[in-house]
Image (cartoon, rainbow, N blue to C red):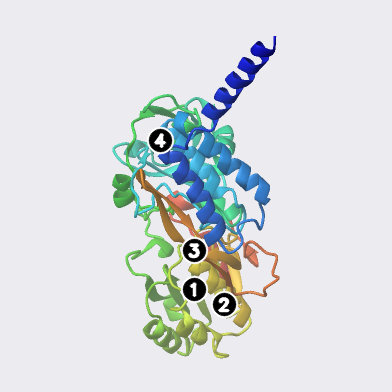
Amino acid sequence: MRLIVVLALLLAGCAGSDDRRPPTPLQRELSELAETMEVSHPDLFHDVPRATFRAEAAELADTAPELTRDELVVGLMRLAALPGPRDGHTALYPFDQHARGLHVYPLRLYDFADGLHVVGSLGQEDLTGRRVTAIGGAPIDEVVELVRPLVPHDNESGFRWLLPEYLTTAEVLRGLAIVDGDTATFSFADGTEAALEPVDAGEVASTLGGAPAPLPTEHDPVWLRDLATDQWLTTLEGGEVVYLGYRLTTGPTHDTAERLFALARKPGVRRVIVDVRLNHGGDNTTFGPLLEALSDPRIDQPGRLFALIGRHTFSAGGNFVTALERDTGVTLVGEPTGGAPNQYGDAQEVRLPNHPDLLVRIPTRYHVFAAPDDPRITHEPDLPVALRSSDYFTGRDPALEEALRRR
């Protein structure tokens, strides 16, 4: 009997040693990624408990050898988005220009106030304008909730900004078992269905653009004109309104500020409008001269200075709005911003050595442009204006119209 007990203990010990076999290279990479997130991020656990994050990271690493590549992509996206609100920079973005290893269905979607519509496509131009009702046979509302944990965001507006990218990513839809195989069937409100094959994300990004924003249309609305110009200055309504399309905070603003100030001081000018609805970031150190010009008492007057904001107003674009709100009496018009008044940014790039086409971004700095204890995670507009698909497809711009009609 004693011999049987000893043998049983030895066998149990052998089984235990098998469970403790060395981690695979992929498991080590995932563990190192989680450690890097903890070390690099200024406060990774501002909204997610440390224990929850570590448990999720450990589970991903433990199961990694059995995961398909699609399931691995989904797991990485979920882990990156786990920090929660105010963390739209912690992410694995499908359209990241520095890591084009993913595949997408050749559609550009936009989440209007009346649902997700196709605003552009490759080879399926007849789908433009149609409202999506299902993907892979699953109702679109269910698909959105399945995808939600993968989408990085500062707030709900930022979630709506990036959601279309994830909804059209083949690895996401396959990894979540929404579709089986390469072909995905998109269903539309008019009863139309389209069976689509994925293409390289870079092909869609180079043709239809990356982070979803309304594409220019034949109606040529002001806010979608001359998008290649980051600081597009013009006048409206016979010179009574000075309009600046401030699309990126990437270049110096001194010359633009001087030109804007000169135009704003002309007789008969009643309004200055700065449109940052497409400004998803850049460099915080560049907008000082513009902010100074807009803060001048000859511009910063009640009912004179307006800013158009929206879900794409993010990162340094959001920081500009925070500074503008802080230093002027600006009236904000449009949707809530995608960026928080104070936010985590300056993201570093981390690649998995064995999957270099998968790039995770991790913030390294907390930008404080509002009060340090400001609890807001978005800028709410003073004058809320939603964009409906009918507005976009007929060339109307209700946010600009609202700013222009105010007396």
Kindly report the distance in space between the C-alpha atoms of the residues bearing marks 1 and 3.
9 Å
* Neighbour tally class for label 4: few under 14, some 14-19, many 20 plus, Cα within 10 Å: many
Q: Which mark, residue 277?
A: 3
What residue is drawn where x is 36% and y is 42%?
102
Q: CA distance from mark 1 to mark 2?
A: 10 Å
The residue at which mark 2 appears reads as: 324
Badge 3 crowding class, 10 Å Cα cut-off, few under 14, some 14 to 19, many 20 or more, is many
Quarter of the image that includes the C terminus: bottom right
Placement of 342 over or under 269, stated as above or below: above
Label 4 element class: helix
Amino acid marked by disc 4 = Ala
Amino acid type indicated by mark 3: Arg
Instruction: Return the disc, 4 or 3, that comes first in the chain's sequence.
Output: 4
Q: Identity of the amino acid at label 1?
A: Val
Residue 275: image location, x then y, percent: 48, 69
Say if mark 1 contacts mark 2, CB within 8 Å: yes
Q: Is residue 76 left or right of residue 98?
A: right
Task: List x then y, in percent, for residue 87.
Answer: 57, 57
